[in-house]
Amino acid sequence: MSPKVVSCAIKVALVVGTMLASINHGRTVRYGEFSRHT
């Protein structure tokens, strides 16, 4: 693997990881609010 491909893969992994983390965070926040209301 060339260095360019490696750096691109790292960037993509970071972006995907950040997106997944924010989605998970949003779910837990929403679920917490929902359980508080009931």
Image (spheres, rainbow, N blue to C red):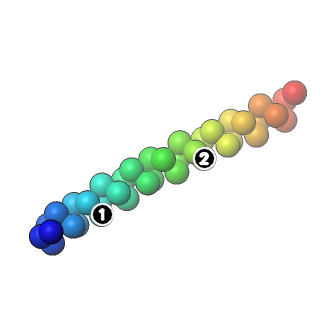
| Residue placed under numbered mark 2 in the picture | 25
**From this viewpoint, which residue is outermost toward the top?**
38
Residue type at mark 1 is: Ile
The residue mark sitting in front, 2 or 1, is 1
Question: In this figure, which residue is indicated by the disc labeled 1?
Answer: 10
**Image point 45% across, 53% down: which residue?**
18
Q: Is 26 placed left or right of 5 in the picture?
A: right
Three-letter residue code for mark 2: His
The answer to whether residue 31 is left or right of residue 8 is right
Indicate the quadrant containing the C terminus: top left, top right, bottom left or bottom right: top right
Task: Return the mark for residue 37.
Answer: none
Secondary structure state at the residue bearing disc 1: helix
Q: Which quadrant of the figure contains the N terminus? A: bottom left
Q: Residue at x 84, y 35 (%)?
A: 36
Residue 29 is situated, as x and y percent measured from the top left of the image, at 68, 42
- Disc 2 is placed on an element classified as helix
34 lies left or right of 2 = right
> Where is residue 8, by image quadrant?
bottom left
Residue 31, placed above or below residue 1: above
Q: Nearer the viewer, residue 3 or 33?
A: 3
Circle 2 Cα neighbour tier, 10 Å, few/some/many (<14 / 14–19 / ≥20) = few
> In the image, residue 31 lies at what x, y percent?
72, 36
Mark 1: give few (<14), some (14-19) or many (20+) Cα within 10 Å: few
Residue sitting at the far right? 38
Residue 36 versus residue 1 in the image, above or below: above
